[in-house]
Image: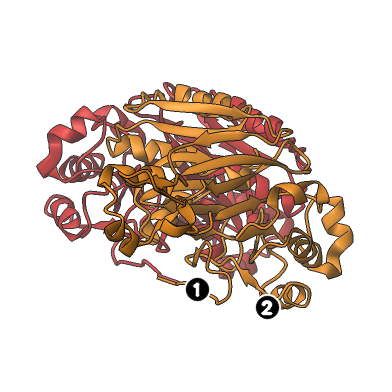
Chain colours: A orange, B red
Amino acid sequence: MQFEVTILGSNGAVAAYERYPSSQALHYNGQTFLIDCGEGTQFRMNKFGIRPGRLDHIFISHLHGDHYFGLAGLLTTFNLNWRQQPLHVYAPRGLEEIIKLQFTYADTKLKFDLHFHPIDTAAHAVIYEDEHLTVETIPLVHRIPTAGFLFREKKLLRKIIAEKMAEYQIPYAQIPLIRQGSDFVTSDGNVIPNSELTTDPTPARSYAYCSDTLYTESILDIIQHVDLLYHETTFSQLHEARATETFHTTTTQAATLALKAGVKKLLIGHFSARYEDLNALLAECRSIFPNTYLAEEGATFIVGEAISEIAVHP
Amino acid sequence: MQFEVTILGSNGAVAAYERYPSSQALHYNGQTFLIDCGEGTQFRMNKFGIRPGRLDHIFISHLHGDHYFGLAGLLTTFNLNWRQQPLHVYAPRGLEEIIKLQFTYADTKLKFDLHFHPIDTAAHAVIYEDEHLTVETIPLVHRIPTAGFLFREKKLLRKIIAEKMAEYQIPYAQIPLIRQGSDFVTSDGNVIPNSELTTDPTPARSYAYCSDTLYTESILDIIQHVDLLYHETTFSQLHEARATETFHTTTTQAATLALKAGVKKLLIGHFSARYEDLNALLAECRSIFPNTYLAEEGATFIVGEAISEIAVHP
């Protein structure tokens, strides 16, 4: 099952060096979820081939402009392109008021249903759920109410051992139950334990997005053991004072958090415009947490592929 | 005196083919005036080297997003870059309310004074004036209140004939009066007529920006004889019905207007995303008004240079 993240915008508040404000497209099993929507997100969706027809859910971490100033334009373009399918936006309180005011003055009448779901950024709660995935808020510590998002695959079903199906002549209708862990009872009453019929399922995968935030260990429980952690690293460890002052995180802090949480892989982004070359930031992280990668525009990361770099630049 | 227009965004509401929403930077004598500010304007200002320190006045034609969704991001970036000089925004009523709401939720405290000047889009009025220039509104006909802008150089001073200054031993202090048209009286009471001392001034130049609008001859009086007319041509003449329905203008209509107004040069833009190749649109205009040019991103047009193409691509 596809579970990938494409970076649409990697920079902090001020764009620089062809790096743009925050936005990511998470692809799961043919669906796309947009995480943050900085200015120009719609242009980079075009550039990197993100298909609007697959996007029904948008998650906004907080109401600093570099995380949502692209939303009104994206919605307007969807409308001009005759979108009809409903769209859901999960965001801190206030975004609906802003977008509606903009649409009032523009006299924009949407051709599709737009549903705003206000989130409580102070709570760790499930805010989205479907057959395969849940999305939970991650309370972050920033200058205004801010939440990260944890995309967690639901527990997958056990894997059938094909030869056993034949050996015990198990009816097709029984398979879903067996994949859920049931034993099988033969026609003569013998109980075949599930462990003989199946192997463990593929482990459920998870992706955590944490931006923007002060370094905080309060999120360790939530992000523990995730396959891929995106954590903001606005500043180098050399500028820790500035990070603290502006409620942001340094490279060393993000890497330490990744280590303490036992995540498999760390992705860093939301870089300050003061850094042209990002390799020093990467090196600072890798000295603590080697499996760290730069979130660069256009790169795609497969969630669950923990060891090797699998960034793909279109 | 420098009087140039750099195109930052040339397209209609939906970006396409590396063409972006409306924005132009008008340079006059070291100052820059921004006209419209579609999404991503700040990125293209960077790209084309537009210096924020020279920009104190922004003119917004109307509150459709493709003409102003870049403003909040631009202002935020100015603030993050420690701007201190005041900034003036001339726009239809409503923009101040929108920007202030966004800044309230972002908890943004501006470090510079931001002055909104609401404009009456139904009136033809002077909304800006300095030593050299005036800016007048051009009432347009669109789905929501919309005004174009006429940048008109003030009447320039007469040109001194250097030899005459020596011949009549004219004191330096008299020159400003003579440039304004005064005669000179010699020490023995002879009156030297101004016409003997000066030649006619360089003609005052003018630039008119008209977007978005239905074809309307009501603006002919205002734009008459301008050196450079930017007029939207969202549609080819082949799609005239669609233009009328959406309150936009076709190529043929814009060229006809340029002809009737006796302008020196026509610049076309705000192209629909349906047109990948713009040469057909250009040809349609030139068949009626030969001195027509495409407003392409990064091109700079010198106001008053009427004959030859002087677009400069950085």
In this view of the protein, can residue B191 be seen by the observer? no
Image height of B3 relative to B270, above or below:
below
Q: Residues within 10 Å of mark 1 (few under 14, many from 20)?
A: some
> x%, y% of residue A223?
69, 52
Which quadrant of the figure contains the C terminus of chain B? Answer: bottom left
Name the quadrant containing residue A269: bottom right
Going from N to C along the chain, the mark reached first, 1 or 2, is: 2
Secondary structure category for the residue under label 2? helix
Q: Nearer the viewer, residue A115 or A29?
A: A29
Front in this rendered view, residue A72 or B121 = A72
Does A312 sit above or below residue B20? below
Q: Is residue A251 left or right of residue B164?
A: right
Output the chain of dot 2.
A
Indicate the amino acid at tag 1. Ile
Q: Give residue A143's position: percent from left, percent from top.
A: 78, 41
For disc 2, the marked residue is A279
Identify which residue is drawn at 50% across, 34% down: A89
Q: Chain of mark 1?
A: A
Viewer-closest of B127 and A175: A175
Are discs 1 and 2 less than 8 Å apart at CB?
no
Dot 2 amino acid type: Asn
Pick out the residue farthest to the right: A241
